[in-house]
C-alpha cells in the first residue's frame, strides 16, 4: 500500500519530537521514507472492472447484440468510456477514421503532467465482432485499462513520465484504428512513446497467463508481477502480431502486453500449473454470441487487471 504524504509527515514529526524530548538527536532513529519514494500501484477493484463489463453488455444488448465498428453499440461504448474519463479529469479526444465504408473512432485520454517527451501508453480495442457483445474480446482489456486510468485519477498519481490511455476502433477488421493512430503521428511524436502496453482478452474462462516477449523491460515488468503472486507465465504466441501492439512495434515503439488465450486448446502441462480444462479452448466463446459477462474468469480478470496497474506504475516512474 502506498504510504501517503501525510503519513510520512507524521512519521518525521514523531522522530523530531522524540529527539527534542530526549535532548538528543534523531540520528539514531529510523529515517522517514524519502518524499520522492516510488509510489506503489493500487489494487484494482475486480468489482469495478466487472461493473464496466456489465455496462458494455447492456450496451450490446440494447444495440443488436454487438459493439462492432460502425455500429451504434460501438459509439455507445466509446461514449461510456469517455464520460468516465472526462469526469475523472483526463484530457480526451476522439480520432475519426473510415474503414469498410463506415466511420470509426479511437479514444485517446491523457493524464495531465509528466514528461511529454517520455510517454507511457496503455491501450485496448473497444470494438467487438458483429456476432457477439465481445465481453472477453475485448471488454476485458478495455475495462481493465479504464479502471487503471480511473485509479490514476483517484490516487492523484504524479508520474515522472506522461501517461496516455487509448481505446481502439476497428481492431477486428485488421488493427485499423491503432494503425491509423500510429500513422497519424509525426516521427518525432512516435519517438516520444517510451512504451506501449496492449491488453486484448485478459479474462478468458479457461485462462492461461501469457506475456508478450517483445520489449525486454516491459516483459520483465509483467513477469515480476506474476512471480510476486506465485503465478507462472508463458510467452504469448497465439496472438503474436494480431492485436494493436503490432502497428506500434512496426514503427519502432517498445511494446508489451498480456493475453489469457483465445481458441488454442489448453495442454495438460498448462492445466497442471494454471488449472482449468485440458483439451478445451482458452475461450470457447471466442468471436461468438456467447462472449457475454458469463464468459469471464474472475480470477484471471482480477490478476491481469492488477498487472495492468502494476506495469503502468512501474514503467512511468
Image (tube, rainbow, N blue to C red):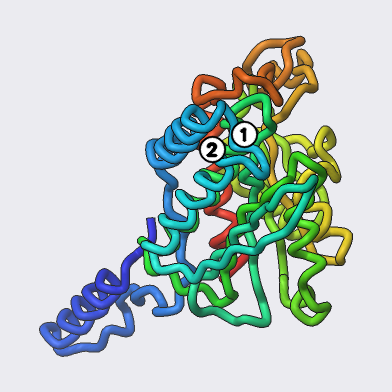
- Whether tag 1 and tag 2 are in contact, CB under 8 A, the answer is yes
Q: 275 or 186: which is nearer to us?
A: 186
Left or right: where 273 falls relative to 240? left
Q: Pinpoint residue 148: horizontal percent, then vertical percent.
A: 49, 53
Q: Residues within 10 Å of mark 2 (few under 14, many from 20)?
A: many
Q: Is residue 93 above or below residue 56?
A: below
Question: Which residue is drawn at the image coordinates 21% and 74% (left, top)?
Answer: 10
Residue named by callout 2: 303
Q: Quadrant of the C terminus?
A: bottom right
Q: Is residue 201 above or below residue 250?
A: above
Tell which tag, 1 or 2, sits nearer the viewer: 2
Q: Earlier in the sequence, mark 1 or mark 2?
A: 1
Q: Is residue 306 visible?
A: no
Q: 102 or 297: which is nearer to us?
A: 102
Q: Pinpoint residue 205: horizontal percent, then vertical percent.
A: 60, 21
Badge 1 marks a residue whose secondary structure is loop
Q: Pinpoint residue 178: horizontal percent, then vertical percent.
A: 74, 56
Farthest residue in the left direction? 21
Q: Is residue 70 visible?
A: yes
Question: Which residue is drawn at the image coordinates 30% and 76% (left, top)?
Answer: 29
Q: 79 or 10: which is nearer to us?
A: 79
Badge 2 marks a residue whose secondary structure is helix
Q: Is residue 73 above or below residue 155?
A: above
Query: How far apart are labels 1 and 2 at the CA level?
Result: 9 Å
Question: Which residue is drawn at the image coordinates 50% and 79% (left, top)?
Answer: 113
Q: Which mark is residue 294?
A: none
Q: Pinpoint residue 77: horizontal percent, then vertical percent.
A: 52, 45
Answer with the quarter of the image where residue 126 lies: top right
Question: Which residue is drawn at the image coordinates 62% and 36% (left, top)?
Answer: 202
Farthest residue in the front direction? 101
Q: Which mark is residue 231?
A: 1
Amino acid at each position: 500500500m502506498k504510504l501517503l504524504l501525510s503519513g510520512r509527515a507524521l512519521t518525521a514529526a514523531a522522530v523530531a519530537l522524540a529527539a527534542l524530548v530526549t535532548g538528543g538527536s534523531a540520528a539514531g532513529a529510523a529515517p522517514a521514507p524519502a518524499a520522492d519514494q516510488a509510489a506503489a500501484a493500487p489494487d484494482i477493484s475486480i468489482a469495478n472492472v466487472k461493473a464496466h463489463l456489465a455496462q458494455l453488455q447492456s450496451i450490446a444488448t440494447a444495440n443488436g447484440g454487438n459493439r462492432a465498428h460502425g455500429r451504434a453499440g460501438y459509439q455507445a461504448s466509446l461514449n461510456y468510456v469517455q464520460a468516465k474519463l472526462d469526469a475523472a479529469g483526463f484530457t480526451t479526444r476522439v480520432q475519426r477514421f473510415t474503414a469498410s465504408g463506415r466511420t470509426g473512432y479511437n479514444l485517446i485520454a491523457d493524464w495531465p503532467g509528466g514528461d511529454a517527451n517520455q510517454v507511457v501508453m496503455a491501450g485496448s480495442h473497444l470494438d467487438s465482432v458483429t456476432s457477439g457483445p465481445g465481453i472477453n474480446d475485448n471488454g476485458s482489456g478495455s475495462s481493465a485499462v479504464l479502471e487503471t486510468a480511473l485509479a490514476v485519477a483517484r490516487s492523484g498519481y504524479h508520474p515522472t513520465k506522461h501517461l496516455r490511455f487509448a481505446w481502439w476502433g476497428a481492431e477486428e477488421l485488421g488493427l485499423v484504428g491503432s494503425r491509423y493512430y500510429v500513422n497519424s503521428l509525426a516521427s518525432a511524436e512516435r519517438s516520444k512513446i517510451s512504451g506501449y502496453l496492449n491488453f486484448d482478452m485478459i479474462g478468458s474462462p479457461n485462462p492461461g497467463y501469457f506475456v508478450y516477449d517483445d520489449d525486454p523491460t516491459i516483459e520483465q515488468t509483467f513477469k515480476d508481477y506474476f512471480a510476486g503472486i506465485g503465478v507462472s507465465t508463458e510467452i504469448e504466441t497465439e496472438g503474436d502480431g494480431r492485436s494493436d501492439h503490432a502497428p506500434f512495434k512496426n514503427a519502432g515503439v517498445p511494446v508489451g502486453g498480456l493475453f489469457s488465450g483465445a481458441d488454442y486448446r489448453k495442454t495438460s502441462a498448462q492445466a497442471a500449473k494454471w488449472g482449468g480444462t485440458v483439451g478445451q479452448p482458452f475461450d470457447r466463446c471466442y468471436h461468438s454470441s456467447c462472449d457475454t459477462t458469463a464468459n469471464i474468469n474472475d480470477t484471471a480478470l482480477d490478476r491481469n487487471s492488477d498487472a495492468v496497474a502494476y506495469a503502468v506504475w512501474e514503467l512511468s516512474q
